[in-house]
Image (cartoon, rainbow, N blue to C red):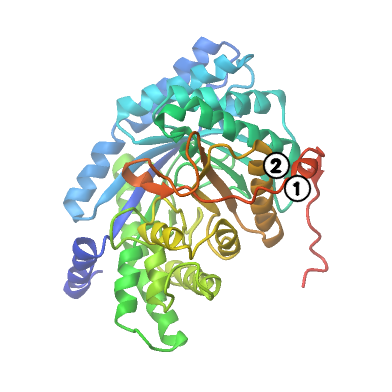
């Protein structure tokens, strides 16, 4: 039971420190929608999603009003569409038609994003997988709310370099298709190594094939709460610092657990997991980079940044797992550049580079996220950046990802604005030395050995 002091403390975190439940994500299995008739397939997809999600937004709003806890987003994740469309889809336009169906039903039920326009190709690609991947640029250009993710590697299978090379082209093509909107399509496209089946955060959410028919997953966020707590222990030892982060993460996660259980009960759908990630927004005071600065760094990217982020990520998990019976998803600290004002400030100041961000991803939740790069960056260079990031995930048995945006017509130093939660970003320089011969080899990088790990 919560006592009156805890209620008052939670209210303060909500009102002054940007505490929120970032998303309630409804996972929906579409496996029973599979049909060789494309028209019938689209009808089945529409009706299953609509019937399951028609009350999602209203219930989320009711919970937010009743408990006084902001619930920023309501979202849907579906079974990877490459699997669902494999029997019916013979052309790129067939898959784009499914994307349009997803977009239509997302708008009608009122969610802000629907994830699962996805393929899992860590070891190899079927014809259906490749067809979906090649349809991504057109699908994301034709829709507003559809998000796409591709899993290109895993610790168990290695990295599918044929798919990595293809995704270099797809990212560039997506940028071109949406160039009139600052290449926004790339902000809805992410590639993974070790993608989790239960991630509630976009653009990487999909409903894994190991999941049940329906599930409620919740993502919480409270960078501002953690920063405020650390302000009170400025100059104290690392032991005090760690204890403070753990206790704060516990409180934040309890809020997520409360909302998840309530949403599950009201919708009559099983509760899945709480993702206890620190996910920033462009709002002042809601920044992971500011937490790092509060730890004692002048800017994110200064020497010591990777150590500080490793500490933060670990303590968030240690505190969070005590607060919820089921923790999953990505769970840790996100470092998206465009969505974090402190990260943007660090880039502008020259403290944070693409290479330093890559080093930081070794110890945090995801990877190179929401990074704007020059629009003339080569597809092979993008493939090389993807390969580097996936290798970090593969070797370290963790999830890593790349959501990178080559903004057509923009050069280093210019700024691109995406709006809303996606924020804005300075265009960052990229190492322009060639990796063409490497990424064009084809085949697969094998899985790492584990027996002699040290």
Pointer 1 residue: 157
User: Could you tell me which secondary element the residue under label 1 belongs to?
Assistant: loop
Neighbor class of circle 2 (other Cα within 10 Å; few <14, some 14-19, many 20+) is many
Task: Give the residue at x 37% y 67%.
Answer: 290
Please identify the quadrant where the C terminus is shown. bottom right
Any part of residue 28 in sight: no
User: Could you tell me which secondary element the residue under label 2 belongs to?
Assistant: loop
Any part of residue 316 in sight: yes
Pointer 2 residue: 122
Q: Judge whether 93 appears above or below 238 on screen.
A: above
Depth check: 312 or 76 in front?
312
Task: Give the residue at x 70% y 42%.
Answer: 122
Depth check: 322 or 426 in front?
426
Q: Position of residue 412 (x, y in %)?
A: 50, 47
Q: Position of residue 316 (x, y in %)?
A: 45, 69
Q: Position of residue 267 (x, y in %)?
A: 32, 40
Q: Is residue 405 left or right of residue 16?
A: right
Disc 1 to disc 2, C-alpha distance: 7 Å
Neighbor class of circle 1 (other Cα within 10 Å; few <14, some 14-19, many 20+) is some
Q: Is residue 144 left or right of residue 148?
A: left
Depth check: 340 or 73 in front?
340
- How many badges with numbers are in the image? 2
Residue 83 quadrant: top right
**Do the residues under discs 1 and 2 have CB atoms within 8 angstroms?**
yes
């Amino acid at each position: 039971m919560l006592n009156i002091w805890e209620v008052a403390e939670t209210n303060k975190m909500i009102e002054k420190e940007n505490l929120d439940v970032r998303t309630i994500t409804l996972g929906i299995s579409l496996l029973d929608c599979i049909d060789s008739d494309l028209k019938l397939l689209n009808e089945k997809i529409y009706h299953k999603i609509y019937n399951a999600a028609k009350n999602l937004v209203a219930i989320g709003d009711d919970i937010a009003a009743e408990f006084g806890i902001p619930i920023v987003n309501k979202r849907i994740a579906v079974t990877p569409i490459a699997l669902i469309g494999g029997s019916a889809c013979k052309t790129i336009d067939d898959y784009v038609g499914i994307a349009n169906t997803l977009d239509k039903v997302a708008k009608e039920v009122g969610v802000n994003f629907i994830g699962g326009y996805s393929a899992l190709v860590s070891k190899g690609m079927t014809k259906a997988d490749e067809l979906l991947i090649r349809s991504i640029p057109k699908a994301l250009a034709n829709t507003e709310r559809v998000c796409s993710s591709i899993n290109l590697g895993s610790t168990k299978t290695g990295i599918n370099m044929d798919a990595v090379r293809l995704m270099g082209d797809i990212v560039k093509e997506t940028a071109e298709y949406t160039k009139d909107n600052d290449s926004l399509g790339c902000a809805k496209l992410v590639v993974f190594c070790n993608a989790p089946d239960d991630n509630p955060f976009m653009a990487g959410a999909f409903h894994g094939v190991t999941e049940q028919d329906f599930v409620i997953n919740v993502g919480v966020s409270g960078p501002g709460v953690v920063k405020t707590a650390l302000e009170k222990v400025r100059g104290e030892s690392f032991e005090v610092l760690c204890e403070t982060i753990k206790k704060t993460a516990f409180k934040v996660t309890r809020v997520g657990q409360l909302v998840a259980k309530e949403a599950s009960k009201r919708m009559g759908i099983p509760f899945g997991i709480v993702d206890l990630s620190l996910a920033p927004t462009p709002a002042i005071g809601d920044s992971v980079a500011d937490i790092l600065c509060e730890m004692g760094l002048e800017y994110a990217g200064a020497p010591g940044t990777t150590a500080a982020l490793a500490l933060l990520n670990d303590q968030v998990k240690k505190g969070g797992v005590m607060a919820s019976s089921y923790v999953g998803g990505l769970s840790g600290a996100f470092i998206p550049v465009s969505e974090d004002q402190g990260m943007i400030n660090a880039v502008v100041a020259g403290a944070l580079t693409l290479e330093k961000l890559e080093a930081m991803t070794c110890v945090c939740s995801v990877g190179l996220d929401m990074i704007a790069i020059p629009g003339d960056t080569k597809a092979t260079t993008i493939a090389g950046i993807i390969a580097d990031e996936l290798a970090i995930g593969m070797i370290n048995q963790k999830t890593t990802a790349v959501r990178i945006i080559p903004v057509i017509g923009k050069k280093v130093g210019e700024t691109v604005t995406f709006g809303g939660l996606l924020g804005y970003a300075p265009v960052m320089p990229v190492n322009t030395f060639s990796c063409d011969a490497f990424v064009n080899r084809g085949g697969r990088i094998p899985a790492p050995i584990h027996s002699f790990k040290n």
